Image (spheres, coloured by chain):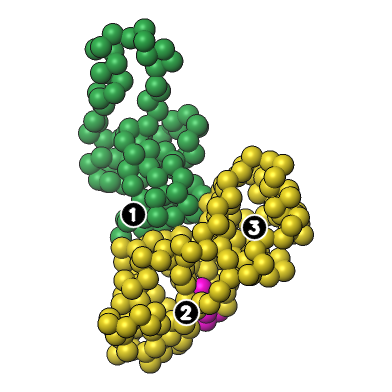
Chain colours: A green, B yellow
């Protein structure tokens, strides 16, 4: 069973959560000043890395809050979860190696 | 014995019983931290219950299901006047959900084995002590579980999930009784 640490409820089973896509994507302050290409970039284009990604998750069947998480897309291992609004935390080489394992 | 043709929303198996909760009213309150603390004071409590904890005040019980949310189990009289008066002075969302909720008191020596078939929560006393409350999944149904005693739980689900929950609990209790 894959456990995910909700910042508010602690470790819970994966079935209680839903994925909210890549994190730290700011909505442009003035969409009217953007070209169609720039707007499409904001709406649709994502990094889709092989390795560590920062994502939004929601504890949909628990406290219902969104939070952010860093996960390795190859192994599904979570490195860290953190509250919305906090900057993306640094990942040590040791943490990255553990997540890739 | 579970009888799908009846509307009896109870389960009675060797080692596990789910008895329907009768009456009372329910309120879902959302607000910022200061608001929830203010509500707790209006209830006569020193502070709002911590995350996943509960507190009782008179015939009301406050369950902290989310950082910004208190679920309130009240008697037929509803919320005390001091509480509604306070809530009239601060931004918040207070919704009565009495008609939405149905619930049971769960008991029996096979209680934990039965719940383990429905929920991935670790319900040992050391990880889910008396007084703990949380929303979680039971099979495919959202529910709110509150440990009222070492060997007793209070479970509530949305009304339309009730026949499903009863059928699931009955099947799980049958398995656990073997
Ligand atoms: Zn949570």
| Nearer mark to the viewer, of 1 and 3 | 3
The relative height of residue B57 versus residue A75 in the rendered view (above or below) is below
- For the residues marked 3 and 2, what is the alpha-carbon distance in whole angstroms? 26 Å
Provide the residue span drawn in magenta: B150-154
The relative height of residue B8 versus residue A35 in the rendered view (above or below) is below
Name the subunit of mark 2: B
In-front residue for pair A33/B22: B22
The residue furthest bottom is B14
Q: Quadrant of the N terminus of chain A?
A: bottom left
Dot 3 or dot 2, earlier in sequence: 2
* Residue under label 3: B49
In-front residue for pair A51/A92: A51
| Nearer mark to the viewer, of 3 and 2 | 2
Tag of residue A14: 1
Element on which disc 2 rests: strand
Q: Picture coordinates of residue B56 (x, y %)?
A: 67, 67
| Nearer mark to the viewer, of 1 and 2 | 2
Beta carbon of the mark 3 residue lies under 8 A of ligand 1: no
Q: Are marks 1 and 3 on the same chain?
A: no
Residue depicted at 36% across the width and 10% down the height:
A32
Residue depicted at 63% across the width and 70% down the height:
B76
- In the rendered structure, the answer to whether residue A39 lies left or right of residue B101 reads left
Residue depicted at 26% across the width and 35% down the height:
A51
Element on which disc 1 rests: helix
Q: Is residue A87 one of those drawn in magenta? A: no
Name the subunit of mark 1: A
In-front residue for pair B96/A65: B96
* Residue under label 2: B20
Q: Are marks 1 and 2 on the same chain?
A: no
Disc 1 + disc 3, Cβ < 8 Å: no
- For the residues marked 1 and 2, what is the alpha-carbon distance in whole angstroms? 30 Å
Q: Picture coordinates of residue B110 (x, y %)?
A: 41, 85
């Amino acid at each position: 069973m894959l456990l995910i640490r909700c910042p508010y409820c602690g470790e819970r089973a994966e079935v209680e959560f839903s994925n909210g896509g890549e994190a730290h994507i700011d909505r442009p302050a003035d969409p009217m000043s953007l070209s169609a290409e720039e707007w499409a970039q904001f709406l649709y284009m994502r990094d889709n890395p092989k390795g560590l990604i920062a994502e939004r998750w929601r504890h949909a069947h628990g406290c219902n809050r969104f939070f952010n998480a860093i996960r390795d897309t190859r192994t599904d291992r979570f490195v860290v979860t953190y509250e919305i609004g906090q900057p993306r935390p640094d990942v040590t080489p040791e943490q990255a190696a553990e997540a890739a394992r | 014995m579970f009888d799908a043709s009846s509307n009896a929303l109870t389960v009675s198996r060797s080692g596990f019983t789910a008895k329907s909760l009768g009456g009372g009213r329910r309120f879902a309150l959302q607000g910022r931290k200061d608001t929830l603390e203010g509500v707790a004071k209006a209830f006569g409590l020193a502070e709002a219950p911590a995350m996943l904890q509960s507190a009782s005040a008179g015939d009301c019980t406050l369950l902290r299901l989310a950082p910004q949310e208190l679920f309130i189990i009240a008697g037929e009289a509803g919320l005390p006047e001091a509480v509604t008066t306070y809530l009239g002075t601060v931004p918040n969302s207070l919704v009565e959900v009495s008609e939405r909720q149905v619930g049971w008191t769960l008991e029996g020596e096979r209680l934990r084995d039965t719940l383990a078939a429905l929920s991935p929560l670790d319900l040992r006393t050391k990880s889910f002590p008396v007084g703990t409350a949380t929303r979680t999944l039971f099979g495919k149904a959202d529910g709110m579980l509150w440990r009222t005693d070492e060997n007793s739980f209070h479970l509530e689900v949305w009304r339309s999930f009730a026949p499903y929950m009863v059928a699931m609990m009955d099947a799980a209790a049958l398995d656990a009784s073997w």
